Image (tube, rainbow, N blue to C red):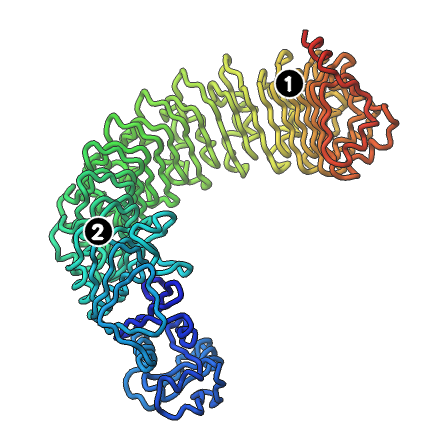
Amino acid sequence: MKPETKTILKHKRMFFVFTHQSLFLIPEGEHEQIRQSKDGYVCLKKKYFPKITSRDTEQVICIACHGEAAPEDFVFPLCREIHFVVCEKCMKYIHERKDERKAFCPYCKEEQGGKEFQEEILDAVLFLIPHQTLPRLEIRPDTEVETIKRLPRGETVFLSNVCVSDAFFFKLLSKTTVEITNRISLFRHVNSLDCCAGEFGARTGKQTKVFIGGGYTREEMKQLYSNIKKIPKNSIQFNSKGIHAVENGICVLLKLLDDAAGYIPDLLLESPKRECIEEILREESNSIWIGKVGRLDLRGYAVEILPKLRIHEENVMEELRLKAYKAEYITEMLKMESNSIWIGKVGRLDLRGYAVEILPKLGIHEENVMEELGLKAYKAEYITEMLKMESNSIWVGKVKKLKLERNAVEILPKLGIHEENVMEELVLDADKAEYITEILKTEANSVWAGKVKRLELTENAVEILPKLRIHEENVMEKLELCAYDPINITEMLKMESNSIWIGKVKNLRLDGYPIEILPKLWFHEENVMEELDLDASMAEEITEMLETEAKSIWAGRVKRLKLEYCAIGILPKLKIHGESMVEDLVLDAYSPEHIAEILKMESNSIWVGKMKKLKLERNAVEILPKLGIHGENVMEELVLDADKAEYITEILKTETNSVWAGKVKRLKLTENAVNILTKLRIHEENVMEKLELCAYKSEDIAEVLKEENNSIWVGRVGKVKIVGYAVGILPKLRIHGENVMEELYLHAYFHWHIYEILEEKDKSVWIGRVRKISLEGYYAEEIKNKLDFTEITQDERLAVVE
């Protein structure tokens, strides 16, 4: 049950109970005898009946099962006169059954059921209980009662310097005459909180939205308006993150805001019914004061009240969001003049559905810099009128992020973007061909985008790329093209190579079929790409490129090259600038099919030259022998990661020490890749800063265990980190005789991690001189006596340094 529909509200050790004609104040002990279910049905204990009726109540019989209720049993009266009742068990059955049958009192002829009827029953039950009638009521934080009190409907309630919940306040406004002296503050009602919290300004901390529900009757609306007219200016403070009003609760709120003080962080108004806001629509434009507001969200028919709102002239709105999915929600607004609905300065503007067509009607401050403009239109009719407008006629000025989705992509040419604008991000997302029908009719390079740092085109929107005109001095941080249907790039494949001007771009990601248009892109001659990321999950996404000659696809200067899945097949086709070195090469494949063609090639036939970092994941580990690494290369890091045995099937067939790695500063082998250690040939003069071996299954080291002790050359190494089963291969490693190790770190938590090494003799595993030994896990300590090492003292360390 939403807060505004609650009729029973707790405060300390008492309850405020709102009925059809009264407000009752009931002590906690008395209230335990009377309850109201979630559905609004009133129930009370059978033993309480003599207090509320003069008729014979020795036998209280359920009208459904004809059972007699015990004194402590709860029963549900069916009418105000309490002619009949229903027991708890039968009431549960009535609610659970799917048919429309209900229980009614056969003696009462008027319409039964519904919220108002249950309120009348509650009113009748409470009225018959002995109570004191109050002429007026003052609500204070320490308000308590010892006996039942009743305030008749329409009598006066005084509020002064208190903080009360939204549910309690609006119940008072609709049922009683409210007098506010000094000031009050409102907070969101939560079941665990009292409805009257304390002194004014309390509960200013963690708050949610104050909620003003709809569904008020005419009589209640009349009472609400009567109270609001008498509320002193600036006497109400909203202690909340925002305000949410629905249906005719919107009218209540907007009248109330004229008397409220302060800033509203978040204001949400929504109504699916026009009649709920007709009173507002009759008002003059800019006549309804809402003051300063952070975020304004209008939905349904509530969108039409935007022209009626008057916002503080110094207000800078964080976000304005308008949602309208029916044409009738904006009918009157479309008749207004362009730029006639003043919104001033706004950080984020989000328009959805038919609300997109309101954009030309909005008046945005000429100095405004919009953080984000988001337009989403799922149907062509959402933008019909906008497509008739001239290009660049809808002024949006300076925008940091522009996101157009579905049909909204079509209006890009209509937007007037400031010539000095630098857009942080431009996102165009269209997953159907009909979303870009009109924009494809425009000339190449005719749609002004200006300076853009990040450009993201998804699916059919990729086809718009040749239509965009990017500033000639633009330096793009990232260009991302994603499409998973060949139709998305059909026309672009017909274009000449280097015909689509991109200019300077730091990061380029092509996902799916857009990989095929890489040769069509024209980069600035001085461009140096930080990263080129190509991702193809299916071979058909790169069919055309696989048929090209080796080194025929110009990639220019690239620092980091990342090829994922089938895109690895393109590696031999790429031509990197002669003066450029790929500092970081990352290859990832999870299927043998991704690397099938490369495995047919000769060893060292794919020239990668000098590089700083090489990372091969899963099946991509298999192509290491095919890479041609420069003889003088010094690799900062080589990472091989294979978590399944099938990822290294072919490389295990190669000869020992046949796979050239050269000089490597950091070598990390994970899981099954540890088995490749015997195949690697490391430069004899190599000085390794760190060797890291991690194995979590016994099969991860099965091949290495077949080797002789001290047979796997690692040379000079600074730090050695060995984890899990990999600890078992420590005897197989051959370390340089003059090596001084900075640290040896062994991690073994289970007995089976050290099973192999325990069979070695004490002091038989030669480590040499070491500055620090770290043994983590109980079982790691057990192998310490197997190690032959000399721990360097502080004086020796200084001598080594000198």
User: At 62% across and 32% down in the image, what residue appears?
Assistant: 617
* Residue in the picture at 44% in, 84% down: 47
Residue 147 figure quarter: bottom left
Residue 707 appears left or right of 693: right
Q: Which of 91 and 653 lies nearest the eye of the viewer?
A: 91
Q: Nearer the viewer, mark 2 or mark 1?
A: 2
Q: Is residue 232 above or below residue 13?
A: above
Q: In the drawing, what numbered circle is on residue 260?
A: 2
Residue 293's label in the rendered image is none
Disc 1 marks a residue whose amino acid type is Lys
- Give residue 528's quadrant in the image: top left
Tell me if I can see residue 381 in this picture. Answer: no
Q: Secondary structure at mark 1?
A: strand
- Percent position (x, y) of residue 230? 15, 59
Single out the residue that lies furthest toward the top.
802
Q: Which mark is residue 665?
A: 1
Relative to 682, is 702 above or below? below
Q: Nearer the viewer, residue 257 or 278?
A: 257
Residue 544 image offset from top left, x and y in percent: 50, 31
In the image, taking residue 728 as reference, residue 127 lies left or right, namely left
